[in-house]
Amino acid sequence: MTPISRSGAGRRNIATLICGALAAGGLAAAGATALEPGAASASSHREAPLISGQPQYDNTDLYAFVSPDKPDTTTIIANFVPFEEPAGGPNFYTFADDAQYDIHIDNNGDAQGELVFRYTFKTHTKNKNTFLYNTGPVDSLDDPDLNITQSYDIELLKLHNQRIVSRTKIADDVPVAPSNVGKASMPDYGKLRDQAVYKLAGGSTTFAGQADDPFFADLRVFDLLYGGNLSEVGNDTLKGYNVNSLAIQVPNSYLRESEHQPIVGIWATVQRRDSRGYYSQVSRLGNPLVNEVVNPQKDKDKFNASQPWYDAQFLKNVTNPELPKLIEAIYKIKAPAEPRNDLVDVFLKGVKGLNQPPYVKAAEELRLNTSIKPTMHPKRLGVLDGDNAGFPNGRRLTDDVIDAALQVVEGELVGSKNDLGDAVDANDQKFEHSFPYLAEPTSGSRGSLAKGTGNDTRSQLGDGLLATGSSGTDTTLVATSAAAGAAGVLLIGTGLIWWRRRNSRYGAY
């Protein structure tokens, strides 16, 4: 994006950096604005004190969009477990067995869920006498070498006035796509991903498993908005990290209240079971970055435990947001006048004539008009750039919510035109063209030491053994240590050098 410009090239460069810093923080504000009467957290990577220590239960992002290749359906994606390091073994990433992962649908604008898709998980271990996640190359989800597996059920709950009136199991014992351990363990991960896509009755489809984190942003903004030093902005902090994803594709007609009321509100929650068997809500997410930037410390855990129906208690956090004041203090960009009723309308009620339901009760939900057809050429700023199929009308994977929200929170809708952004305009991985649309997870063999690409020393280390002089092999790694010799591999991290001949084997692994 073009950064905000003042007068003169030098000032423009500084402004560009500012927009980068502000965008990451600013977005949160915008998302936060969404928080006001509707307290839900989104893009919530470690957004509240309690949930930051419970990653299995932590919502990171929520997406909802009319399916581009099946416009008679809507796809909803809820992500969990932030900052999954791909090579983070030997215990990789699972959904919690003692939790209920819920996707809520409000189809009449009353801030209550009329439908809930409830996911529950079970973990299975084939061999408890090994430390390995898998004991050999994995060719399928039922491969005996895949030692740790998960399966899940989905219940469809129908509610009236926040009370359950019916329960129907719509998925039973469906397998979860595993963590992408690496090329040696999972030589064809795409095949495993395909096996985890399941058709359900009535035209729905489901997926659960690991994926590349689709959220893109420069999160170093939390370093006091860069403290005025913007020399390092524009880095996608989420690059190379994975998440655990739930994705479900459902016919539009099933989600809607009626043919004449196509707008739905969506949010996700997680309930954790205690020692007595009771469940308590510990995480909640709707619009992006609400709980991270809009709510002060005293409200963050309360927000994660709350329901949209009670979101009025957080209204002041939205109408009098902290972020614009911080931006003004550090970068001298004047904050818009308060109260910020423009934020209430856009983020808590929906945009009139686009995704605001009739008789709406202000609440923090991701609102989607399911009658708006997908566009062939999505614009990353969505509605701000004339693309009504994008954010804040739902949220597509490609929507640049940081830039869009930052511009709105800095007054785009009340006459303060701006072009702020964080200089991170797209995800580092390309998304797929069919369900579940998410990019495959980064492989563990391109793990902690290999965030970049190419055949340099750092990116080769994650691939295991690297023989010198073999055809097509980069010898740079060996060159880093004259002692490595013709058949060595340098393992950095422990400071030890291990020697193995080219033809050695790792046994069962």
Image (tube, grey):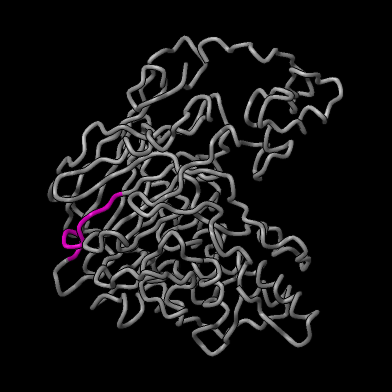
Number of disc labels: 0
Q: Residue at x 51, y 82 (%)?
A: 339
Quarter where residue 446 is shown: top right
Residue 48 seen anywhere in this rendered image of the structure:
no
Residue furthest to the bottom in view is 415
Q: How far across and how far down the image is residue 1, in percent?
A: 60, 73
In the image, 106 versus 434, the foreground residue is 434
Q: Residue furthest front?
A: 471
Relative side of 394 to 131, left or right: left
- Residue 346 lies in what quarter of the image? bottom left
Between 465 and 103, the residue placed more toward the observer is 465
Is 230 rendered above or below residue 476?
Answer: below
Relative vertical location of residue 28 with respect to residue 278 in this rendering, above or below: below
Q: Residue at x 33, y 50 (%)?
A: 435
Q: Is residue 494 above or below residue 454?
A: above
Q: Residue at x 55, y 48 (%)?
A: 49
Point out residue 233 in the picture as x, y percentages from the top left corner: 70, 62
Query: Is 250 included in the stretch rendered in magenta?
Result: yes
Most foreground residue, 489 or 418: 489
Q: In the displayed image of the protein, which residue is found farthest to the right? A: 482
In the image: residue 58, left or right of residue 406: left
Q: Residue at x 58, y 32 (%)?
A: 445
Q: Position of residue 493 (x, y in %)?
A: 74, 28
Residue span colored magenta: 248-256
Q: Is residue 9 magenta?
A: no
- Quick check: can you spot residue 331? yes
> Can you give x and y, in whole percent of width and height, for residue 37 in the image?
40, 69
